[in-house]
Image (tube, grey):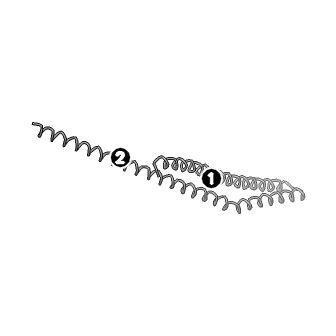
């Protein structure tokens, strides 16, 4: 494969890596938001329980108490659903991260191949230049010694 083709392949790998990095960042952001949502539910539940206790101490009607209890149960159910879904969200982050690492590895491999080719071409050019310098030096030596 020519260097030009390898550069095109490298450009594609760079694009794929950027896309994979974006997807990983989005998944990580979703996880952060998911955890924040859980914390908000938990705080809201705790505040509601405290409010129920405070109003209960001051005297609370049975229907108001039942309303508080039902709402707290709904909050707890929402929290439970969040906790059950958390492993799936975390798994998505892991999948996106592995994909990004894999794509990054491919990009690095192509970059390494291009660097080795460039180094080999430079080495070949250096040898060619040295050979020309040696030939020129020999030519001057023979011209100097045999033209007398």
Judged left or right of residue 2, residue 12 is right
Judged left or right of residue 61, residue 88 is left
Does dot 1 land on a helix, a strand or a loop? helix
Question: For this rendering, which residue is in front, 31 or 119?
Answer: 119
In x, y percent, where is residue 143? 15, 38
Look at mark 2 in the image and give the residue it sits on: 122
Which of the two marks, 2 or 1, is nearer to us in this view?
A: 2
Residue 40 is labelled as: none
Does dot 2 land on a helix, a strand or a loop? helix
In x, y percent, where is residue 18? 57, 48
Residue for point 46% across, 49% down:
2
Question: For this rendering, which residue is in front, 48 or 36?
Answer: 36
In x, y percent, where is residue 21? 58, 50
Vertical side of 13 occupied by 83: above or below:
below
Confirm or deny contact between disc 2 and disc 1 (CB under 8 A).
no
Question: For this rendering, which residue is in front, 99 or 148?
Answer: 148
Look at mark 1 in the image and give the residue it sits on: 28
């Amino acid at each position: 494969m020519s260097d030009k083709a390898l550069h095109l392949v490298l450009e594609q790998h760079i694009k794929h890596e950027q896309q994979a990095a974006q997807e990983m960042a989005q998944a990580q952001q979703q996880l952060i938001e998911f955890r924040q949502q859980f914390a908000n539910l938990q705080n809201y539940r705790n505040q509601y329980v405290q409010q129920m206790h405070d109003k209960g101490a001051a005297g609370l009607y049975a229907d108001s108490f039942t309303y508080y209890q039902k709402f707290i149960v709904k909050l707890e159910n929402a929290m439970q659903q969040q906790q059950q879904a958390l492993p799936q969200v975390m798994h998505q982050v892991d999948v996106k991260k592995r994909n990004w690492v894999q794509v990054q590895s491919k990009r690095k491999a192509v970059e390494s191949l291009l660097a080795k080719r460039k180094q080999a071409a430079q080495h070949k050019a250096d040898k060619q230049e040295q050979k020309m310098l040696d030939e020129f030096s020999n030519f001057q030596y023979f011209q100097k010694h045999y033209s007398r």
